[in-house]
Image (cartoon, helix red, strand yellow):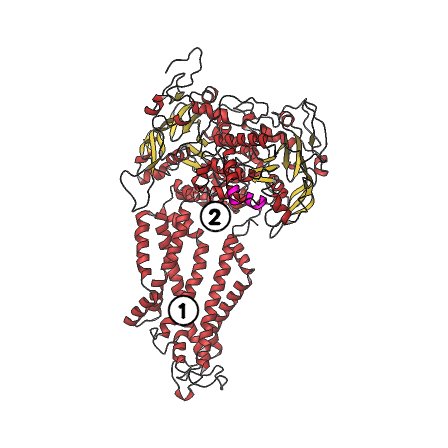
Amino acid sequence: MTAAAVEATQPEAAVATPSLARRTLSVFARNKLALLGAVLLVGLIAFCFLGPLIHHTDQVHTDLSQANLAPGSAGHPLGTTDLGYDMLGRLMYGGQTSLEVGLAAGLLATLFGTVYGAVAGYFGGWVDAAMMRITDAALAIPALFLLVVVAAIITPSKPVLILIIASVAWLSPARLIRGEALALRSRDYIHAMRLMGGGGSRAVFQHIVPNAIGTVIVNATFQIADAILYVAYLSFLGLSIPPPAADWGSMLSSGITYTQVGYWWLIFPPGIAIVLVVAAFNFIGDGLRDAFDVRLQKN
Amino acid sequence: MTDKLLTIEDLHVEIASRARTVHALDGVDLDLAPGEALGIVGESGCGKTMTALSVLGLLPNGGRITGGRVLFDGTDLAAAAQPVLRDVRGNTIGMVFQDPLTSLNPTMTIGAQVAEPLVLHTGATKAEAWRKAEETLRLVGMPQPGERMKNYPHQLSGGMRQRVAIAMALVCEPKLLIADEPTTALDVTTQHQILELIDELRDRLGMAMILVTHDLGVIAKRVDKVAVMYAGKVAERAGVRPLFAAPRHRYTQALFAALPERAADESQPLATIPGLPPSLVVRPTGCRFAPRCAFATDECRAAEPELTDALDPGEGGGEHAFACFHPVDPETDPVAEVVPPAPEAAPVRTDESLLTLREVAKEYPLNSGPFARRKGAAAVSAVAGVSLTVKRGETFGIVGESGCGKSTLGRMVVGLEAPTGGEIRFEGQDITALGRKELRAHRREVQLMFQDSYASMDPRSRVGAILREPLVIQGIGDRAAQDARIAELLDEVGLPRGAVDRYPHEFSGGQRQRLGLARALALSPALVVADEPVSALDVSVQAQILNLMRDLQRDKGLTYLFISHDLAVVRYLADTVGVMYLGKLVETGPAEAVFGTPLHPYTRGLLDTVNEPDPTAEPTGTPLGGETPSAAAPPSGCRFRTRCPIAQDICATTEPPPAEPTAAGHRVACHFPLVPAGPGAAGA
């Protein structure tokens, strides 16, 4: 050690501090609404994916003799649909589609949009100009209109539906992350890395994306919520995966026919489920945003 | 006590945050007579600013006064209600903050802002207030105040903004002016002008002043008495001359010893203060300075020394209070010998040139962006034709005011920016012509030490990852070898090896600067470009970093390109010095020659402007006036001519060629170099 080395020794210097991720989680856990969102989401996932193991129903064959039974009928706690499917079972079954497609489309859109935006923002100049004009052009087309047209041309399966939704949803994370990357690229630590001889891919994947991770994750939660709504829109318009498959949007759509006769159990359960899952994701997103904000504060 | 304007008695302030409470002030006693000027000095985090803010009741969130009194003109401000405080602020007490841009409202005109306190406090009409504001702006030396009042803050330079801030503080003719680091963000020449202005106004208006600063040079000639603060307490309180001549508290003594200006000999390491001020979450037992004090005994660790009143033995015989069990005895203890300097090996300078710059220029187009490029568009000429040679093993210091292009030059040398003209040769190779692969290999040889080390480290990476990154990028060693190298680097810069598991924000400023140096050294470069590496640090920590840089230079044969605005630091560290003004290198040569017998009027002016930390020093020469012109439209001929005291017609028409009028190696670009009269002085 050099003569001037004495400054550094602090008593607690030997103990490693908890990782940033752990500190983020602990701040998140202190936010009651965010915690409620997380509990809601876990509950909904368990309901949709584990529920069918307890409550066995036939969601393939119609049974018109059992159509439109009111809630509380024998074996049908939430009643039955117009085609005789058990409502509770259908809610679980449809929820699987909604959640799977929503999560997959939201994550795919975030992943692609993040990389796209980070690359555009970091390299800047004409690369950025060209890449961002593409997103601007795509944003100019109303998403719902695009979805309806595409869904009308091809009959969607789950993977196709995921791709269609992701293909319109990636635009907003791309623009968001591009802005972050523009700010981050002029940081000294990026300069320091370039001075060591590091290149673009290292900058984007080791520094820009990790430092924008707060924005990315928060945006991902909202993207998933949006994607679930998109699925609901499309199937409400009858443009989703064809029957006997179901999701919450198509359940709403078929139930709407019976509002006049008062079959409320066809509408409220899927409607409430959509509201709950979207709200849950939004609560989580808000909580994460706060958590990422305070993450780097000194403790 | 009735003749005192301000009396602070046993003031306690606590700042509560989420998890803890900091005892920011712990029994501060100060007083101030009308018209008197008090300087408060100390390292950062010692409670200087807190003391100033608590007088005005402007403590930060979570802060409150928990004990003591602040008597101002007979009113206890510590216990006063908000309306009383509002009436005092900006009216009988004016305040000037550090950053002149953030303390002005960007959406209001200058005139409206200066007039605002008048309307609030005196009930003046708008027209009256406006007239008075114009008068005040003229008083603070604002040219064409009537025109300027319609401007917005961003249209003014930093020095002018600080003048506006001072005008705002003075417009109600306060009895007390509190200035918190009023010149820290400004250039040396502007700093000098502002300090002169405050001095003059204080005389004219007869107001008292509290000047809070970390810079002992600023305080030396501007105040009547000084309070040295340490860890929320007053460590020493005395008249300015006795304090500078014979400090009694060991902390004050150590602060002075760490000044590069006071270094006995430039080949000796600076005296340092080890460690950091305590965090004040827990009240320390014993003397607060004891853990860092070379003279501490068990007595110091057990009991807390009281401020003892003693009369000054020297001239005047004013109050000289200090809280120390083992004070400096002025008879037997000369200031310089705090830490016995270690014997030093001879420096490793050679005559082999490592880096050569020839006519290097950098222009930034004013209209940038992919679609805005026009031929012949206006450009900012940041660096204009700089030629210099750095020899292997030396420290080449570059000094100049902000905007002179010194940082841009450094960034071109490390390759962050490409020059728009000229060539940069490193070991004889033109680095602007290197291919991708060669450039990558060249990166190992030249590294940059940043001014703000915190910003230069990825906040999400642990120190281990930060130090490993250069090794990974350059593909040096396997993981185990890299770990060994990281441990070695941490040892070299004097940080514990456990640091690898921590994040950059957990370190203090000085420790981060050590980390920055460690990373710069990871690739064993030949040249380290250090861009203002110590300008954000306290003087005690600055001395540590400067010593460390010297030690490492000696051990590793490093070459430094040391960029700084601080003449004292450059004088201490550099072997060769280059002085830059508005993109031009106006003078270069051996450090002793440039500082001892400057040839360029700009260098002379800079040296005359520096605030020597010595209250008895006689003002010499003529400090620089005016402001640096815009680099977008530099003056014709010699760029310095607009501020030059000896400029002639030729200076406006012809650019002075570099010449060596006195000795080989001491070059100056001036038509009328200040050649000392005497033997050996040859005409240009």
Circle 2 chain: B
How many callouts does the rendering have? 2
Mark number displayed over residue B461: 2
The residue carrying pointer 1 sits among few (fewer than 14), some (14 to 19) or many (20 or more) residues within 10 Å by Cα, namely many
Task: Work out how far the residue at label 2 is from the one at label 1, CA to CA, in angstroms.
Answer: 37 Å
Looking at this view, name the residue that lies furthest to the bottom: A65
Mark number displayed over residue A229: 1
Tell me if residue B121 is in the magenta stretch. yes
Residue B121: x percent and y percent?
58, 44
Question: In which quadrant of the rendered image does the N terminus of chain B lie?
Answer: top right
Taking the spot 40% from the left edge, 43% from the top edge, the residue there is B473
Q: Is residue A74 above or below residue A112?
A: below
Q: Is residue B123 left or right of residue B683?
A: right
Taking the spot 31% from the left edge, 66% from the top edge, the residue there is A146
Tag 1: residue type? Leu
Circle 1 chain: A
Q: Which residues are magenta?
A: B117-128
Residue B284: x percent and y percent?
67, 42
